[in-house]
Amino acid sequence: MKYLLLFFAFSSILLVSCDDLSSPYPAGKPCKSYIDSTLVGFWEPVKIENFSESNLPLDTPMIAIAPFNNKEYLLQFLNIDDSGKAQVKDMGTYRSFISNIGKQKVANVIMISPEINNKIEYIILPFEISGDTLIFYSFYSKKVNQEFHSTCQLRKFLKKNIGNKSLYSSIRKYKKKYFNKIIL
């Protein structure tokens, strides 16, 4: 069965594991975000490099990324069967926005749902696009022994560690997928 993941997923992504770095604060302000049209579309997983003891699923669904407004993206995970019929994968629906840490883009991903115990958590996913490939880098929360009490603290951590692969839990790669027809 083929999978389709809708959104900007960063994340994610998601693709998101409980072991990915999260923060009560995003890596930037949503008002400074923008829509990058190269992110919009369907992304099929092609490779997951797991550097941790976490049990990342290898059957990650596709990500569908769509503009939510002029600053944010909507992320949805979908399964696509052989006939082209799409089914929403029960992983939640997410909103995301882009922050820049120097030249590095970072997705700030949050689930759209009532907060659990009044707690909001952003999943922090540095990413890049290379040709038709979307690559997410996930920090392993168990290797980051730091709590973030502000966006400023999180940004300082990211500036210092964005290239430190020893802190990653995984690298997830997705190829842009083009469909003749999708049935919802």
Image: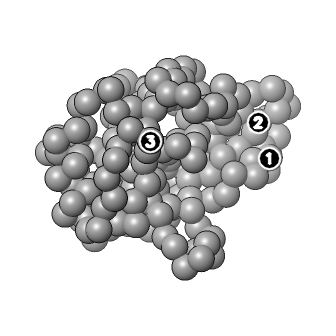
Q: Which amino acid does label 2 sit on?
A: Ile
166 vs 9, left or right, is left
**First-in-chain label (2 vs 3):** 2
Q: What element carries label 2?
A: strand
86 vs 34, left or right, is right
Residue 173 visible at all: no
Q: In which quarter of the image is residue 2?
A: top right
In x, y percent, where is residue 106?
A: 32, 47
Q: Residues within 10 Å of mark 3 (few under 14, many from 20)?
A: some
Which marked residue is nearer to the observer: mark 3 or mark 1?
3
**First-in-chain label (2 vs 1):** 2
Question: What residue is pinned by disc 1?
Answer: 87
Q: Which residue is drawn at 56% across and 62% down?
A: 111
Separation of residues labelled 2 and 3 (CA atoms): 33 Å
Separation of residues labelled 3 and 1 (CA atoms): 33 Å
Q: Quadrant of residue 3?
A: top right
Q: Are marks 2 and 1 in contact (CB under 8 Å)?
A: yes
Separation of residues labelled 2 and 1 (CA atoms): 6 Å
Question: What residue is pinned by disc 3?
Answer: 142
Q: Residue at x 66, y 46 (%)?
A: 77
Which coloring applies here?
one colour
The residue at the far bottom in this view is 118
Front residue of 65 and 159 = 159
**First-in-chain label (3 vs 1):** 1
Q: Residues within 10 Å of mark 2 (few under 14, many from 20)?
A: many
Q: Quadrant of the N terminus?
A: top right
Question: What residue is pinned by disc 2?
Answer: 80
Q: In this view, does 33 lie above or below 88?
A: below
Q: What element carries label 1?
A: strand
